[in-house]
Each structure stands twice: as C-alpha cells, then as structure tokens.
C-alpha cells in the first residue's frame, strides 16, 4: 500500500489514525509537530501522501504543507481540522487539497485517503 505521514498533536487521535491506516495496509509515519514532520521527510524521503492536522502548535498544517511542497511539489495531502474561519478555509482550499472536519467517520477518512492516493485530488 502507501507510506503515509500523519501529523497530529493529539496523541489519542494520532494513535487512532495510525491504527486505521495500518489496518488498511498502509505504512504510517506518525509525528506530533511540524518540525518533526520536516525532519522525518528530510531523513527518510517523502511519503506517498500526508494527513495533516491544521491546528498544530507553533505553525499550522497549511504552512507545513507549503514547506513540504517546497521540497516535494507533488505531495498529496489531506487536512483534518475543527477550525472553520473564513481565512483558514480559503488557505486550505488554495492548496487544492481536500479536508475532513473533526469528528469524522472512519469510512469518510478511508474514502478520502483512497481518493488522495488514487490521484482523485491533485495538488493545488
């Protein structure tokens, strides 16, 4: 299957995402911060796709995607968020990436990642 970078600062949700993705046959690289995500990608190369929380400590997931795409422009990503400001929605949409709102159903997460990996949501 695919190698997925999961960036989520809430340990319980990160663990749940890892369980769901591993159960679907994916290799998962879980991290809690933007800095850890960048170090991991620098050391191990780009993942097949990234699942990024938007509300992260320090920098947000949209900024992180910008940093990742400077190095890997075609990296597909999915945002997960509880935040809904107009400015944030505009920034997420400008990336061309899909997003899911928390809480989300397992089937919606699976469908979003399957679509992402099949090229259904090309990078912006």
Image (spheres, rainbow, N blue to C red):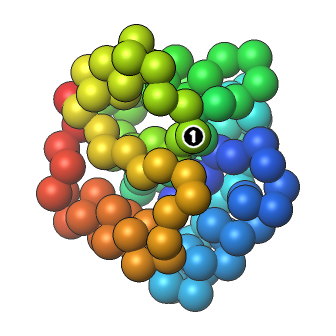
Q: Quadrant of the C terminus?
A: top left
Q: Tell me residue 107's x, y (percent).
A: 41, 78
Is any atom of residue 6 visible in this view?
yes
User: 82 or 77, which lies in front?
Assistant: 82
The crowd level at tag 1 (other Cα within 10 Å; few <14, some 14-19, many 20+) is few
Q: Secondary structure at mark 1?
A: loop
The percent position of residue 73, horizontal first and vertical second, equals 31, 29
Q: Is residue 53 left or right of residue 49?
A: right
Quarter of the view holding residue 54: top right
Residue under the point 58% across and 87% down: 23
Number of numbered discs visible in the structure rendering: 1
Height in image: 86 above or below 33? above
Q: Which residue corresponds to the image point at 38% horizontal and 45% vertical from the top-left?
A: 99
Residue at the spot 18% in from the left edge and 57% down from the top edge: 119
Query: Horizontally, is 51 left or right of 124 in the view?
Result: right
Judging depth in this view, the residue of 99 and 5 nearest the camera is 99
> What percent of the width, then of the height, locates residue 118?
21, 65
Residue at the disc numbered 1: 82
Lateral position of residue 85 relative to residue 64, left or right? left
State the residue at coordinates (72%, 59%): 14
Tell me the quarter of the image containing the N terminus. bottom left
Q: Quadrant of residue 117?
A: bottom left
């Amino acid at each position: 299957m695919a190698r997925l970078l999961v960036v989520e600062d809430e340990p319980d949700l990160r663990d749940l995402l890892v369980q769901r993705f591993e159960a679907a046959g994916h290799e998962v690289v879980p991290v809690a911060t933007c800095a850890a995500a960048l170090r991991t990608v620098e050391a191990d190369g780009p993942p097949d796709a990234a699942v990024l929380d938007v509300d992260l400590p320090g920098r947000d997931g949209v900024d992180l995607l910008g940093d990742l795409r400077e190095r890997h422009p075609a990296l597909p990503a999915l945002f997960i968020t509880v935040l809904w400001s107009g400015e944030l929605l505009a920034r997420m949409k400008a990336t061309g990436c899909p997003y899911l709102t928390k809480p989300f159903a397992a089937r919606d997460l699976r469908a979003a990642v399957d679509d992402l990996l099949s090229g259904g949501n090309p990078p912006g």
